Amino acid sequence: DIQMTQSPSSLSASVGDRVTISCRASQGISNYLAWYQQKPGKVPKLLIYAASTLQSGVPARFSGSGSGTDFSLTISSLQPEDVATYYCQRYDSAPSAFGRGTRLDIK
Amino acid sequence: EVQLLQSGGGLVQPGGSLTLSCAGSGFTFSNHAMSWVRQAPGKGLEWVSSIRGNGDTTYYADSVKGRFTISRDNSKNALHLQMNYLRADDTAVYYCAREPYTTPINWFDPWGQGTLVTVSS
């Protein structure tokens, strides 16, 4: 099965910083990649699908890029409400799989 | 408004069984594949199972294959997960989630509120 490796596992940044989270697939998955945000104690929320398509209602400071094996989620200007754990998910075929997550805090 | 309302869950002994349910509203239920995703306490997300919109195709993670059964009743806009031979490592919050198309496997949006399953003696 194709494995998803996220990095870093945790990250601390200041308000206003540009933040990038990476996700690497063990084999090529084209653009079948989604990103989710999970705030503490809350349900996961879809941010991006098809590697770079922003879900309706998600702030424009979030963006996704990549194709094949290397992907990234970028927050252009970190806000306090962005404190959360972020997960990537591959959906090129069954079994679908998530990355292990990146915990993002405010410095 | 699209909503997924989950029911079921609770405490069960190892080797026992439990059924989770998820009621969809605000959308044409049969037009969407549906899935279950779980999250063990303090851990990440794990895809569990998916079912095609008409119910004729199912997929399972290796960790639950042969023990869990996903099903749906489109006449009642309901999704179910029958869990048998439960083990301690099945302890998790279980989420149902809608997929965008009738055929799985895709991204998930929205998600149900989650229900905790605890397997313990």
Image: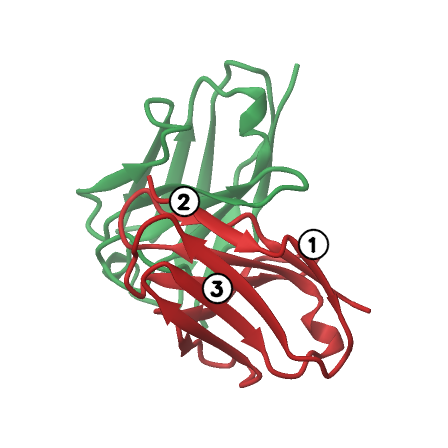
State the residue in front, B90 or A53. A53
The disc at residue A35 is: 3
Of labels 3 and 2, earlier in sequence is 2
Residue displayed at 58% across by 70% down: A20
Is the Cβ of the residue at disc 3 closer than 8 Å to that at disc 2? no
Tell me which amino acid carries mark 1: Gly
State the residue in front, A67 or B47. A67
Vertical position of residue B74 compared to residue A32: above or below: above
Provide the chain ID for the residue under circle 3: A
Vertical position of residue B80 compared to residue B13: above or below: below
Which residue was labeled with disc 2? A3
Foreground mark, 1 or 2, reads: 2
Foreground mark, 3 or 2, reads: 2
Residue at the far right: name it.
Answer: A107
Which element type, helix, strand or loop, lies under badge 1?
A: loop
Foreground mark, 1 or 3, reads: 3
Which residue was labeled with disc 1? A41
Quadrant containing the C terminus of chain B is top right
Kindly report the distance in space between the C-alpha atoms of the residues bearing marks 1 and 3.
18 Å
**Same chain? Circles 1 and 3:** yes
Tell me which amino acid carries mark 3: Trp
